[in-house]
Amino acid sequence: MTEEESKKLGPLEKYKPAKTNYKKIVNYTWSWFKDIFIAFIIVLGLYTYVFQFSQIRGNSMYPTLEDGERVFVEKVTGWAGDFKRGDVITLKYPQDPDVSFVKRIIAFEDETISIRQGIVFVDGKPLREDYVKKTEPFDEMLPITVPKGYLFVMGDNRPASSDSRRWGFLPKAYAYGRVLFIFWPFNSIGALE
């Protein structure tokens, strides 16, 4: 506005605010809302089908996992059913599927498992378990074959673990994720072996 135009205007007209373009504001706000909504849906889908974060409760997996640690769980292996012996998995507790446990896969369907003097045998061969630090020499289990569609799982802290020795075989459909690494606390960060 030139000085000459300013003189022609009355005192209040000089300070009149510029016209607000409400359509631009609405479009801009709607654009942000759509982006946030799409991002939310993507994250929700990833969290539901691809990964999740879990907190360890209890010491049944000690020393591999300790009470209070937080872990990253990938779920692709779970729905693909591509677990391997020794994988640390998240599972639905067979006696209450609303409760989740973390255990290690010991045997698959059609394999025979037994325990003699604290040593686990799969199909008659001793299982190498460097992750187990404490066993009970009196821990015994007669040979039993894992039925089709099931897994046999155990905690690494054998004396303190509620697992397949106590509540039986785990339906494969109840195994839903594989623990990949610890991300909290910082002094425990690292991948699982």
Image: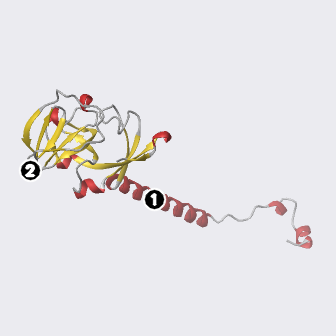
Position of residue 61 in the picture relative to residue 111 (left or right) = right
- Say what secondary structure mark 2 lies in: loop
Circle number at residue 110 = 2
Q: Residue at x 29, y 49 (%)?
A: 177
The answer to whether 151 is drawn above or below residue 34 in the figure is above
Picture coordinates of residue 190, whole percent (x, y): 43, 47
Position of residue 152 in the picture relative to residue 101 (left or right) = left
Q: CA distance from mark 2 to mark 1?
A: 44 Å
The answer to whether 52 is drawn above or below residue 67 in the figure is below
In the image, what residue type sits under mark 2? Answer: Asp
Position of residue 181 in the picture relative to residue 90 (left or right) = right
Model colouring = secondary structure
Q: Residue at x 35, y 33 (%)?
A: 57
Q: Nearer the viewer, residue 1 or 129?
A: 129
Picture coordinates of residue 133, whole percent (x, y): 30, 34
Circle 1 residue: 39
- Say what secondary structure mark 1 lies in: helix
Q: Nearer the viewer, mark 2 or mark 1?
A: 2
Q: Residue at x 92, y 70 (%)?
A: 3
Query: Quadrant where the N terminus lies?
Result: bottom right
The answer to whether 110 is drawn above or below residue 138 in the figure is below
